[in-house]
Image (cartoon, rainbow, N blue to C red):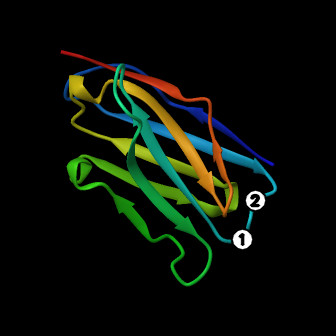
Amino acid sequence: QVHLVESGGGLVQAGGSLRLSCAASGMISSINVMGWYRQAPGEEREMVAGIVSGGITDHADSVQDRFKGRFTISRDNAKNTVFLQMNSLKPEDTAVYYCKYSDGTDYWGQGTQVTVSS
């Protein structure tokens, strides 16, 4: 089992920044992928970004095109923690942001609310 705890969400004005954190604990595999997804009210959950830990692609990351230039994903392998730096936030970024851990089995965090006011 892997347990994920997200933090860093909140209320921010348009143009502002937030940094989300997700700490994983439990049976952490040497090679895994951690990522961020978001779900706005009435919308499907969508992927934001992902990053690899371990193996020859250690720290390889992928940010969905629509978020490139504003969002950056990073991780601290020693702490099994992944971060999502979100800049130039827009009201349409308002959503619940979920952390996901995958090593062949998927685990999800409880989500953290991000609200961007206009």
Instruction: Give the residue displayed 57% in from the left and 47% down from the top.
Output: 100
Quarter of the C terminus within the rendering: top left
Q: Which mark is residue 114?
A: none
Q: In the image, what residue occupies the spot 21% across and 28% down? A: 90
Classed neighbour count for the residue bearing mark 2: other residues with Cα under 10 Å, few (<14), some (14–19), many (≥20):
some
Q: Position of residue 83 (x, y in %)?
A: 49, 48
Amino acid at circle 2? Ile
Mark 1 is on which residue type?
Ser
Question: In the visual, does 2 lie left or right of 40?
Answer: right
Location of residue 88 in the rendering, given as x and y in whole percent from the top left corner: 21, 36
Relative to 25, 86 lies left or right: left
Image quadrant in which you'd find residue 41: top left
The answer to which quarter of the image holds residue 32 is: bottom right
Quick check: marks 1 and 2 in contact, CB under 8 Å? Answer: yes
Residue shown at 19% from the left, 29% from the top: 15
Left or right side of 25 for 62: left
Question: SS of the residue at dot 2?
Answer: loop
**Crowd around label 1: few <14 · some 14–19 · many ≥20 (10 Å):** few
Q: Looking at the picture, tell me which residue is in the foreground, 13 or 4.
A: 4
Considering only vertical position in the picture, is 114 above or below 37?
Answer: above
Instruction: Determine the residue located farthest toward the bottom in the rendered image.
Output: 56
Vertical placement of residue 51 versus 114, above or below: below
**Residue that badge 2 annotates:** 28
Whole-number angstrom distance, CA of label 1 to CA of label 2: 7 Å
Residue wearing tag 1: 30
Where is residue 50 shown, x and y percent of the image?
A: 45, 57
Q: Position of residue 74 (x, y in %)?
A: 46, 57
Q: Secondary structure at mark 1?
A: loop
At x 67% / y 55%, what residue is drawn?
80
Residue 111 is drawn in which quadrant? top right
